[in-house]
Image: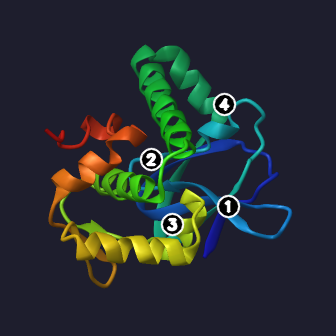
Amino acid sequence: DTALVFAGMPMRSVYWVASGLMKACSVDVDGNERIRAFYLPGDLIGLDAWGEHVCPATVMAIVPSHVYAVPLAELKTLLLRDPSLTQNLLERASGDLSSALALAGDFSADQRLAAFLLDLRNRSGGGDLHLEVSQRDIGAYLRMTNETVCRKLKEFQRNGWIVCGSHIVRFLNEHALTRLAEPVGLHHRNGGWARAA
């Protein structure tokens, strides 16, 4: 993995992901990696450091990635000149916060995993999900063990909801997954999921 920034570093820029896949992670007192976010093309990295100007987490590439840096001073000037850009940035920050709060809620492992898969698929543009995220990383993000993630994915497959191939997840019964995931509340992002009846 290639690090873009490290936790505790001064944050002088935000970064726009042009291609690839990145993750933000930190290590707890017991040495366990905790993943705070995944960044896909079109996402902004660094909004969570806006106030303190210090990186709260290490951000690294999961696959070869291309990012553009925008100095904070330059971004602040642009925001003063363009109210629509300010609105867009606030919507992005609001979406990130809502997602973090949703997945931190008291939901079952099934609900959180279903919501994660649907959200990641929608953020990736729909269709089959090219899942470059490891089961270990999914577990570190959803606060599950690797074994739980593996078991739940197998259950989803036995239920006929998905088929997992080599880094590919094909959705066979999105209706069932949506009904399971809807209480988590991530359907507000990117236009929402297909609503379950």
Identify the element where label 3 is drawn: helix
Distance between mark 1 and mark 4 Cα atoms: 30 Å
Instruction: Look at the numbered discs 3 and 4 and tell me whether their residues touch, using CB distance below 8 Å.
Output: no
Q: Earlier in the sequence, mark 2 or mark 4?
A: 2
Type of amino acid under label 2: Asp
Give how far across and how far down residue 50 sits, in percent.
Answer: 68, 33
Structural crowding at the residue carrying mark 3, measured as other residues with C-alpha within 10 Å and reported as few (<14), some (14–19) or many (≥20)? many
Which disc number belongs to residue 34? 1
Q: Earlier in the sequence, mark 3 or mark 4?
A: 4
* Quarter of the figure with the C terminus: top left
* Quarter of the figure with the N terminus: bottom right
Residue at x 80%, y 61% (from the top left corner): 28
Which disc number belongs to residue 138? 3
Type of amino acid under label 4: Ala
Identify the element where label 1 is drawn: strand
Structural crowding at the residue carrying mark 4, measured as other residues with C-alpha within 10 Å and reported as few (<14), some (14–19) or many (≥20)? few
Distance between mark 1 and mark 3 Cα atoms: 10 Å
Distance between mark 3 and mark 2 Cα atoms: 18 Å
Residue at x 57%, y 44% (from the top left corner): 104
Q: Residue furthest right?
A: 29
Give how far across and how far down residue 69 sits, in percent.
Answer: 57, 49
Identify the element where label 2 is drawn: loop
> Which residue is labeled 4 in the image?
73
From the image, state whether disc 2 or disc 4 is nearer to you: 2
Structural crowding at the residue carrying mark 1, measured as other residues with C-alpha within 10 Å and reported as few (<14), some (14–19) or many (≥20)? some
From the image, state whether disc 1 or disc 4 is nearer to you: 1
Q: Earlier in the sequence, mark 2 or mark 1?
A: 1
Residue 179 visible in the snapshot:
yes
Type of amino acid under label 1: Arg
Quadrant in which residue 157 is drawn: bottom left
Colour scheme employed for the rendering of this structure:
rainbow
Q: Nearer the viewer, residue 86 or 130?
A: 130
